[in-house]
Amino acid sequence: MKSSLPDCVTGIPINFANGVREHVRLGPKIYETVKGKLSLGARIVQRGGVKKIFKQLFRVSEREKLLKASQCHLSTTAGPIAGLLFISTEKVAFCSDRSLTFSSPNGGFIRTPYKVVIPIKKIKRVEESENAHKPKQKYIEIVTVDHFDFWFMGFVNYEKAFKFLRQAMNISSQ
């Protein structure tokens, strides 16, 4: 017998709910992840929205347009780093939610956000991927013309992020 329940639970689409669960699961502790997301939301509001944050964090040309900003994680050899992925008409850019500590050449330590900038024209291909054992875990792989791989995961809304990434690639090729 088929269930008469809609595709959503309490008004939240199941894909979105799965995305939130997957995004939170990648954090070190659920409490810290939720606290970090609330703090990020407050910072976005304080700074005037994601478009302003994008312009503050990255060099943006006059004709460049922000298409989408998505919360996700960047996969690194040290583990996933939570942050915002910005998809524009000219670049894909990532900035971590929190500053990371790095050792400086003079022996001290510096704290700085982890940033990645990939010009759209340098992207060779974009691939969708999922964990064979856990199909709800979806990834986006970006491969550049100089053979660098970037893996993004834990999207709150994976489908939208991938759609806007494809759109940026199409705009760039015109």
Image (cartoon, rainbow, N blue to C red):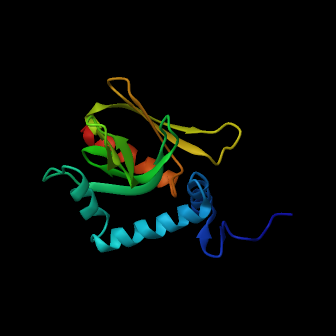
Residue at the extreme top of the image, as rendered: 146
Q: Is residue 60 above or below residue 17?
A: above
Q: Quadrant of residue 172?
A: top left
Q: Nearer the viewer, residue 34 or 59?
A: 34
Residue shown at 68% from the left, 36% from the top:
132
Q: Please provide percent x and percent y for residue 85.
A: 38, 51
The outermost residue toward the bottom is 10
The answer to which quarter of the image holds residue 10 is bottom right
Indicate the quadrant containing the N terminus: top left, top right, bottom left or bottom right. Answer: bottom right
| In this rendering, position of residue 29 left or right of residue 113 | right
The one nearer the camera, 170 or 136, is: 136
The x, y position of residue 136, in whole percent, is: 64, 48
What residue is shown at x 50% (from left), y 52% (from top)? 159
For this view, does 11 lie left or right of residue 67?
right
Residue positioned 31% across, 63% down in the render: 50
Q: Position of residue 13 (x, y in %)?
A: 60, 66
Q: Is residue 78 left or right of residue 4?
A: left
Name of the residue lying farthest toward the left: 62
Q: Position of residue 153 (x, y in %)?
A: 52, 46
| Figure quadrant of the C terminus | top left
- Outermost residue toward the front in this view: 107
Q: Quadrant of residue 117?
A: top left
Image height check: is 151 above or below 112?
above
